[in-house]
Image (cartoon, rainbow, N blue to C red):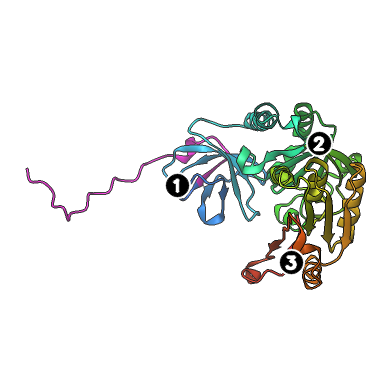
Amino acid sequence: MSEPSPTEKPEKAPPRVYDRATWPKPWAQLKYFTFQPAIFPRLLGQVSSDARPGDFVNVYDKNGNLAGGGLYNPRAKIPLRVVAHSAEPVNESYFETAIRRAVDLRRTLFKLDEVTDAYRLINSDGDGLSGLTIDRYGDTLLCEVYSLGIAQRLPKWLPLLHELAGTKFARVHVDHDLGSLEGIKPSTFNETNAAAPRLVKIREHGVRYEVDFAEGHKTGFFCDQRDNRRAFARFAKDARVLDLCCYTGGFSLNAKVTGGATDVTAVDLDEAAIAQAKRNANLNQARIKFVHADAFAYARQMQQNGGEVGRRDARPAEVHFHARGRRQLGRPSEIRRP
């Protein structure tokens, strides 16, 4: 028997035959093999006719094999959010398991409660809960919802979350435009939000802060900067510190309170942010000079005057640029300070 020539292509295996009528409903099938959680329209194949917006559906791959489960919403920009990839059946009980796993990771393994009571409790896709992020601030949970399926289920999850995290209140935020697109009613969380406080006080590495849920960009306190604030304090011993774009004073306070800086000047253009930073300084009985000014103009003026910018030992300066859409990529015009 002659061997095939190296130039000959092997014959393709015939496509697998499967019967969708045997699949548990509701279901959705993928057009391509993928393990990403966000399934955009071009990746989504057929969907069972009984699948309704917000339903938990069984997910099958292009060959008809069970691939996991997810939340379906045909009107969304991401019509399918796969929350679990599995060859075994997945059902609604998965969500309680995912919530318990996420909270246990922060409280038991990372032991975050030992250093702070403000941290990311649920991290969307990272915790297998696509479309939901939750930050804990003291006894209050701040929930950001990006999915109709999540919005439908969150009221039932909140008692479990409070039990696991030791919290009492929740504030739920849904972006207006995204909520309209997803089909989330604006009034869904009115009662929950009304019961929650507007202001809470938190602690982090021995520093106290006030968090205002009604003002500022994402509360004015960024949990993901916790390690950076702590690390910066190690450089501040007996130093003169200039904090440009200080916002609500996280780096300034760490330099002064835990770092032992001799002198701290904090500059920001946002009046509300400066006011909040002053309240945070008062909470810690910390003497910090706050300057309401454009940080860049201030720095240039001080340099021209041979002033304090050049003589400072440590200068945290953080400016984040955000493009609103593709047209602004490469030339972002909006500045937001962390």
Q: Which mark is residue 206?
A: 2
Q: Position of residue 247 (x, y in %)?
A: 81, 55
Quarter the C terminus occupies? bottom right
Q: Looking at the magenta stretch, what is its main secondary structure?
A: loop
Question: Disc 3 residue type?
Answer: Glu
Name the side, left or right, on which 279 lies relative to 135: right
**Element at label 1:** loop
Q: Position of residue 196 (x, y in %)?
A: 89, 40
Quarter the N terminus occupies? top left
Q: Residue at x 77, y 68 (%)?
A: 296
Q: Which residue is identified by label 1? A: 33
Q: Which residue is identified by label 3? A: 334
Q: Which mark is residue 92?
A: none
Q: Position of residue 146 (x, y in %)?
A: 70, 49
Q: Is residue 242 magenta?
A: no
Question: Up-down: is 88 above or below 4?
Answer: above
The span picked out in magenta is: 1-29
Q: Residue at x 79, y 65 (%)?
A: 295
Residue 242 occupies quadrant: bottom right
**Element at label 2:** loop
Looking at the rendered image, the disc whose residue lies closer to the viewer, 2 or 3, is 2
Mark closest to the chain's N terminus, 2 or 1: 1
Question: Disc 1 residue type?
Answer: Phe
